[in-house]
Image (cartoon, rainbow, N blue to C red):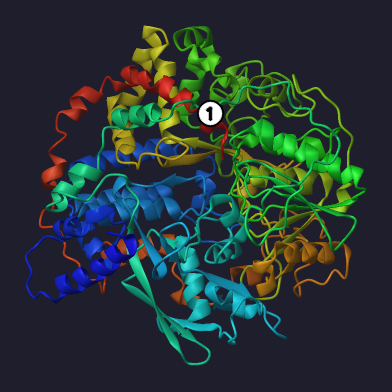
Amino acid sequence: MSLRVALVALAAIARSVHAQEGTTQAPCSQLSALSSNNATFFPADLTLSCLRSVPLAKQDDLLQLQGLRTFLEFQSDLEYLADPVIGRIYPGADLLAGLDKLTSMLQDDSYDNEYDFQLDVFKLFSSAYDGHLSYIPDIVDVFAFARLQNEELNDEGIPAYFSLISVVTGENNTPDIYAYSDEPALTKSGNADYSPSPVTKINGEDVLAWVNSYASQNGRSQDPDANYNGVFLNIPALAYENIESNYFALSRFYQGNNTVLTFSNGSTLDVMTRAQLLSSKPLEGLTDGASFFDRFCNNNLTESLLAQANSSSTAPSLTASNDTQVPFEPVSTDGVAPPHPAYPSPIVIASDNSVAGYLSDTYPDLAILAVPSFSSVSPIEFENVVRQLLATANDDERTRLVIDLRGNGGGTIFLAYDLFRQLFPSETPYGAGNYRAGELHNVTGRIASDNIKQLRSAYPELVKTGVDGVVLNSFNYREPLTVDNEDFDSWKDFFGPHQNDKGNFTSLNRFNLTDISATTVPILGYAVDNITQPRTFSPQDIVLLHDGTCASTCAIFSEFMTSQMSTWSVAVGGRPQTGPMQGVGGVKGSQIQGMFVLSTIISAVISAAPLGDQISFLSEFGTDLIAATQQALNRASPGGALLVKASVNFRNNIRKGDESETPLQHIYEAADGRFFYTSQMYADQTAVWDQAYDSTWGSMECVEGSTEHPSSVTGGGNITAGPPETARNFFGGNGTIFLGGELGTVWRNGTSGDESSNSGSENGTNSGNGTTGGKNDDKDDKSGASMLETPFLLATSLAFSVVLLCL
């Protein structure tokens, strides 16, 4: 049976199921019946009913919250989130108080099913609007809710997602919202011979109010314009990921069975919504919520990670190499395909599309370096593509450069350092940061520093994998350098703590780039990568092209460029209003750390320590910490670059000269100009690059009021300027839902879940401890020693050591 036939049959069966009055078949059993022939999409309301029939595991959930509290001690800006400074736009998020409230609600039996509880845990972490701070519970990651164009199949053999775009048309100064499928009609291309109308309402609500509220619920960026852009199709991200990953197409939250779009011409369109199965585990054989829990929840972490490791024939390698030189002459583009039909043929492109080079036909002095991601299968290849583009531009006498960073959510930290060095070979990237100085960090780092030889002897993987300096950068004072690129004298010298009005932090520190270049990713001019190359472009002849989604490693690179070299940036898109916009709207922290990796490092450090240190550690922190952190990891969804989908923002990025040492995450920085998308820019990416050029060196026409904001490079780079009032405009007024506020409503009402008020879902019959809560009664007795036993996973962790470099 084809997938199309299966979907048609699915719809018929679903109608039949819902037509049966008083059916007693459990929702999860109904999903099982619909899951034949490898079905991927299921009725949204039935799926929600199944999820909400999963019985609550109360006692295990209480232990899970204890573990999450421990991991949050490593969140670098925990106090800044709870008590925001002027640079933050979204409401503050007191994460520890949130865990207290969730604990209280569990104890008061406010939850009657596992899904609603875990969804609130997910919302709590998401309320920080920090792309590095993430905790996706296993039950939340079984399904996503997808909006589909129709039940037809696209070229890849799956239904096409339904996406929106935000574009300026005609004489309008601000954009309207259209269906992406209307792009050919908007651009007068293909066979489209109609005049498309913009969307004016979604589900009966004003379209701007709906989109802004929806963006605040689904977005993870710290800037509302970035989250607004995230609702719409992103061509660079699509070219790199080969999937429409925007929030409107895919959401973690229940969307109903359809979404009603109303257009300016009065017509309406019902967009179907289906629950999309994300898990590789099948639905066949489910009978009820308890069986769903057994299959998808509380999996044995050890087994999951070992299976993940065994499924990879070879682990990714970041071993440095001298083979970084490429010819300084053009490369033939014959047979090189564009990464997407909207792109021209590249001059050079990485095999994974993470970086590419182009030469403009419109402007004979313009070259384009497109970097949709710093996550590269081969860092060496990434660096060589950059080198080749610069060499080709130099040979072709191209004197201006657009660096297109749209859709770039980060990647390998040190590719940002190398890219900066390739552009400015004589400049030293600053990159100083600090860590939150918590007591667990202090004790672990002191023991690691005192016993580093024993640790390396017990776990040679630390040395063999070539990532020693990155793994232990914050736990061994010998690895990082001072702001003056000198050695720290002792653990106390590194750790401090240093106190400001937000709490305790370590000394400012920098990565040892010579060691990093020798052992992990080669960085131009350091260690083995000691070749030389000329500077091709001057700072004033480079512009960064942003769309707000720039985050993590992308934010590190942008900080090098704007803060150190005063390079301009221009942003595209955002909310349909005048005024400035941040180019870097995503997380600006300088290192993500997986919760599993943290747990493994601490376990390895303590296990390699003398018995006295082990006893002292367990005496101070207790075995409850051990059992609780293990339970938090067991309930995190397995997979992803960090092995489990649970992480914190580990390291703050601090601007050079900022005596307040405010994390860049909490400093507002407007781009130097801004423009909106046109429909042509979705069809032809050269139109975007042309506009970036024109906004910087041509007519310099930008959105009204978007230039020379005091926080921008052209406005003086004032880090205390704060966002303008327009940045706080959410169009929806009090109706706009923020993740933190949403949770606050849940807490005040003493109920859980707000997605399903019209879903007709069935709650689980078990509450309190539930049938699943008692299954693991023997686990706590065993886990007391797991701090000394879990280093069996260290080899697995280090086999995937590339993740320790990724943001």
Location of residue 460 with respect to 559 vertically, above or below: above
Q: Quadrant of the C terminus?
A: top right
Residue, disc 1? 316
What residue appears at the point 10 percent right and 74 percent down from the top-left corner? 20
Q: Position of residue 239 (x, y in %)?
A: 60, 54
Q: To which quarter of the image does residue 281 belong?
A: top left
Residue 28 placement (x, y as % from top left): 17, 57
Q: Is residue 332 left or right of residue 603?
A: right
Element under label 1? loop
Where residue 266 sits: x, y (%)? 48, 92
| 163 sits to left or right of 42 | right
Report if residue 110 is visible in the image.
no
| Residue 311 in view | yes
Residue at left 19%, top 50%? 284
Quadrant of the rendered image containing residue 230: bottom right
Q: Is residue 751 above or below residue 113?
A: below
Q: Quadrant of the N terminus?
A: bottom left
Hey, what amino acid is under mark 1? Pro
Please say if 602 is above or below 401.
Answer: above
As drawn, the residue found furthest toward the right would be 397
Q: Is residue 201 above or below residue 388?
A: below
Q: Residues within 10 Å of mark 1 (few under 14, many from 20)?
A: some
Image position of 11 (left or right of 487): left
Left or right for 537, reference 630: right
Q: How many marks?
A: 1
Q: Position of residue 796 (x, y in %)?
A: 41, 24
